[in-house]
Image (tube, coloured by chain):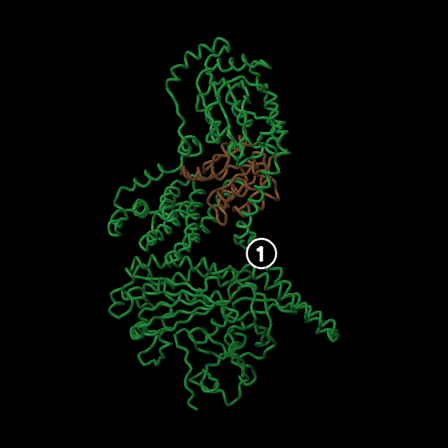
Chain colours: A brown, B green
Amino acid sequence: MKKKVLTVDDSRTIRNMLLVTLNNAGFDTVQAEDGVEGLEVLEESQPDVIVTDINMPRLDGFGFIEGVRQNDRYRAIPILVLTTESDPEKKNRAREAGATGWIVKPFDPSKLISAIERVTA
Amino acid sequence: MDMNEIKEIFFQECEEQLAELESGLLALNDGDTDPETVNAVFRAVHSIKGGAGAFGLDDLVAFAHVFETTLDCVRSNKLDASPELLKVMLRSADVLADLTAAARDGGSVDKSRTSGLVTELEAFASGQPVPAAAASAAPETPAAEPEAAAPAAEPAPAGTPEATDDSGFQPVPFSFDEFGDEDDADTGAASDTQETAASVFTVRFKPRSDLYAKGNESVLLLRDLSKVGALQVRCEADDLPSVEQLDPEGAYFSWLIRVETDQDEDAVRQVFEFAEWDCTLEVTAGADEEAFAATSASGEDQPMAPVPFDLSLLDDAAPVVTAAEPAAEAQTLAAADSAPEPEPAAPAPAPALAAEADAPLAPPELPRAAKAIAAEAEKKEITVAAVPTAPQTIRVDLDRVDRLINLVGELVINQAMLAQSVVENESGSTSAINLGLEELQQLTREIQDSVMAIRAQPVKPVFQRMGRIVREIADMTGKNVRLVTEGENTEVDKTVIDKLAEPLTHMIRNAVDHGLETPEKRTAAGKNAEGVLKLSAKHRSGRIVIEIADDGAGINRERVRSKAIENGLITPETNLSDEEIDNLIFHPGFSTAEKLSDISGRGVGMDVVKRSIQSLGGRISITSKPGHGSVFTMSLPLTLAVLDGMVVSVANQTLVVPLTAIVETLQPEKNDIHSFGSSQRLIAIRDTFCPLVDVGNILDFRAEPANPIDGVALLVESEGGGQRALMVDAIQGQRQVVIKSLEANYTNVPGIAAATILGDGRVALILDVDAVVTASRGHALRPEMSLPATG
């Protein structure tokens, strides 16, 4: 069965790149534009793994991850943070919020896929 | 979708981000202290950088990075958003826009501009702003510097994430002594594994419950590790408490793994990249046969040799793991543990793995913890829900909207034709049909309005672009200018917006260049050294009115007048009102700038602006007060697709006159008509005289003007406030017509703005009122005037 990936990113460019990359790799992809929408889409689409940006309007990546982790059903879902932040402090915050792993932007398609495969069964 | 299409999207998005950036910076400049504004500004630059990185647009990435770093200082309150900083940032936003444009359209951006700003931005970020003077001298600093500096601060390309990511990790103690042992270990191991180049590592891996809480999974890590090399895995379950004490979300197992691989230790460690913080991990070179031996030897119940790890197990077990191995906030006893002590283990590795994977114990214990978490989640959900939701939008291809608009246009025509044929067949006398027709008409009108609303967009993006123009011209001319915008959410058809930018740019340049005085002159005149330019938009009677008001010196009428005489536009005797003098500046070739600057340029004057506004069906006028400034007012139709028109007959032709141009209609009386000069006729309207223009004559429908008394006069207003009475034969009615471009379907016809299809299916021409008025003046400028009635 195809794995379903939820991507959360406010950049249309990045959303499209993720979509193309993930679809080419045989994933089902659902997308959201910010944390608030991400939490909504999460409920509707029941993904197997989440890829999220950090800097987003309304609800940022940290808040989104916390929100997911507080959801009984998704508190153990793998969440990869996709961000250009190289600041260790931010990475720590993402971890503390409950991120499973991360991918540094600009991402290399194969790295993205291998990171997703690493955290999904 | 391919990369080129995504790149296209990227540039579109850049446009939006740049607009967001600028409006945010301007808001900050106006004293906005909302942290969300700073965040939005930061995100804009951040997004551009992120996308640019994906497409390898290095110049853009480098500059955006420096910009972003400085913005981050503001965002984290390390740096104050001072006016000086904002000025630099606004200029940086302009450069960022240029770099984006250069990346899209090719071309390059002046390196000295970029490097100068990079220096200034970096100075702010480091807390030592360079004085403006020093900074503007700075462009001389080697241009290579920012390029060299910026990429260094960049996250490493995705190809080497380990390198960058190390910064996020706790350093893992690593002893080089162990490398020394490697050879020995290898030789030791070689005897029983027949390894040649491969090395052996022993991994001790003890997850803490946090590891599971963050969605990581031991089983998956082991699977990943198996891609590095052949594994021998032993699960140690010494810490597994009795069932009563078992925390279903705890982490009780640890793993002893022997990896045989031709890769290095980093490759082994990298598998645990995501988990490293939430486990104790020990990777040693060489096989720890002793540990394996000790474990197996002292296992009292089930003395077992290391069992080869059966990976096929994972594929089935794993999905269950994700579902049933839930995360836990609770700390477990394992948390404080250091490296696992290899001690006799009770359960055999493989069953233990299965046990953990299936987690059969978990469900009954779950509810308590789950409830607490659910309660917590509910609390959080409220805060999440409180975030205001943005209006839902969809993106639609413009072609589709245009197609819809065309169809609705046809519908309007069709409806009109239907109404007409009903009237002609006299079957319209039944009230039911009339009622239905009326309703149809109303619905058609509503559909049309709704469709038009789809194309309507706020003028904001155009207004925002003007901010930059003002800054540039102000810098060039050494003037202090503050741009104030108002009504930027006023909506108008997209085609109008697209065509608005050019004339507006020209007028803004003109206002700063010619309208506003230098700070010295302003101070001398007792004004604030900073000039104010106000750009406003509002809806007024079905049109959009845009005003550009400056608080400069106003029009120098003496100079305009003498210049006009010099250019032969008027004679020294011509008697002109102030308003008429002001409107002379719209005359072709008129320019009063004492020295032509490269800003306003030679030959491109207000007449060009006027013409482009007119081509949009708009009007422009100026009012000016000496010493207090000038106001340019332009009014434009909200849409270029339909217009309300008066259908008239002229020499057996049907014409449509735009309703917006008509002030009033009147039936001339014989006594009202007066001759003036050889051919000119005037009509007396209340206490003024107004020139009469025979439309049929001017359009060459007939050689001689018809007798005014037989026709109807349409009093129209042209720009500059002058009025003309257009003579037509009869008025047929008033209706909304769909504009069909003549230029697109036929060719440009002087005096005719466009065409339309009437209810009876015939084509009618739409009169270009301004062109007709202009033609009535002949070639020489005879300023239109309302002569006082002399009786």
Host chain of mark 1: B
Measured along the vertical axis of the image, is residue B742 above or below residue B349?
below
Label 1 environment density (alpha carbons within 10 Å; few <14, some 14–19, many ≥20): some
In the structure shown, which secondary structural element does the residue marked by tag 1 occupy?
A: helix
Camera-nearest residue between A11 and B596: A11
Q: Position of residue B8 (x, y in %)?
A: 49, 46
Residue sticking out furthest to the bottom: B791
At label 1, the amino acid type is Val
User: In the rendered image, which quarter contains the N terminus of chain B?
Assistant: top right
Measured along the vertical axis of the image, is residue B285 above or below residue B454?
above
Camera-nearest residue between B199 and B716: B199
Q: Residue at x 48, y 22 (%)?
A: B340
Q: Position of residue B443 (x, y in %)?
A: 65, 66
Camera-nearest residue between B334 and B90: B334
Measured along the vertical axis of the image, is residue B16 above or below residue B421?
above
Camera-nearest residue between A81 and B784: A81
Q: Position of residue B119 (x, y in %)?
A: 30, 45
User: In the rendered image, which quarter contains the C terminus of chain B?
Assistant: bottom left
In the rendered image, which residue does mark 1 sit on?
Answer: B401
